[in-house]
Image (spheres, grey):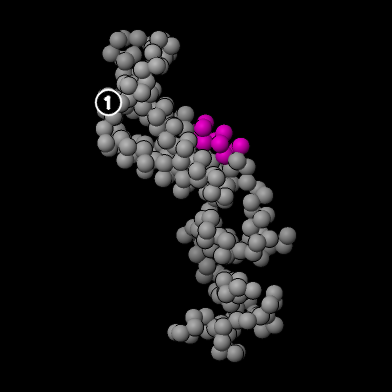
Amino acid sequence: MTRQEHLKFCKVCINKDLNLKKGIVCKLTGDIADFDNECESYVLDEAEVAKMDNEVTFQRGEINTRISQEKLDALKAEQSLPAAIFAGVFVGILAAMVWAFITVTTGYKIGIVAIGVGAAVGLGMRYFGKGIDSIYGIFGAIIAIISCFVGDLLSIIGLIADAESLGFFETLLLFDYSQTFNVIKEIASPMDFIFYAIAAAEGYKFSFRNFTEKELYEIDNSKS
């Protein structure tokens, strides 16, 4: 067993002790754990379990060191990339529409809303996809950027409709989409790219399923 696998037991054992040089050691031997599979001296410290953090969350890489491979595989079996993508696209379209509404209503392009778009996409993917693998974050970032782009496009169409006293859906049909990139390029600013990048980062970060220390402990010690 690795040191990390040992520590999953040692941290909640009543016989643990702290050594300034070695870290957590066994009070009975004065040394770090060296058992395989089971420790004959292991006694669960209920008070230590009760003190476990149930607020600070862990994601992907951190989860690997806190639960067994068997439990990790079980969590991965619950993943659904199609559900995550569908949720991300659906939420992204709604968020883009909200962004366009805010822009048209206020007459200002509020770039910071892009960050909210990215976070909303990621949270939607997390809830429905239960993703742990890196592919979920990659899709979260991509969908977040596309959603921001759609939000910009809908904002332009809404502003044109407002200026020309046309209906939104009428303008949507009449708009020359071959000029989309040219129009967006004309109104884009360096800050837009920064907000897009942050939105992508938010989409990536929030797409992953997360767990608190206490949840991981309960998962790792639950019966299969």
- In the orientation shown, which residue stands out farthest toward the bottom? 29
Question: In the image, residue 54 lies at what x, y percent?
Answer: 51, 61
In the rendered view of the protein, which quadrant contains the C terminus?
Answer: bottom right
- Asked whether the viewer can see residue 48, the reply is yes
Residue 192 found in image quarter? top left
Q: Main secondary structure of the magenta part?
A: helix
Task: State the residue in front, 70 or 99.
Answer: 70
Confirm whether the magenta stretch covers residue 203: no
Question: Label 1 belongs to which residue?
Answer: 187
Is residue 134 shown left or right of residue 172?
A: right
Question: In the image, residue 172 lies at what x, y percent?
Answer: 41, 14
Task: State the residue in front, 67 or 54.
Answer: 67
Question: In the image, residue 178 lies at what x, y percent?
Answer: 39, 16
Number of marks in the image?
A: 1
Is residue 12 shown left or right of residue 192?
A: right
Residue drawn at the location 56% of the way across and 83% of the way down: 32
Residue drawn at the location 47% of the way across and 33% of the way down: 92
Residue drawn at the location 47% of the way across and 29% of the way down: 93
Vertical relation: 103 (above or below) 18? above
Q: Secondary structure at mark 1?
A: helix
- In the orientation shown, which residue stands out farthest toward the right? 224
Instruction: Report crowding for label 1: few under 14, some 14 to 19, many 20 or more residues within 10 A (C-alpha).
Output: few
Q: Amino acid at mark 1?
A: Ile
In the rendered view of the protein, which quadrant contains the N terminus?
Answer: bottom right
Give the magenta range: 82-91
Vertical relation: 43 (above or below) 214? below
Residue drawn at the location 56% of the way across and 89% of the way down: 30
Confirm whether the magenta stretch covers residue 84: yes
Question: In the image, residue 220 lies at what x, y percent?
Answer: 64, 63
Task: State the residue in front, 154 or 217.
Answer: 154
- Asked whether the viewer can see residue 95, the reply is no
Is residue 217 shown left or right of residue 38?
A: left
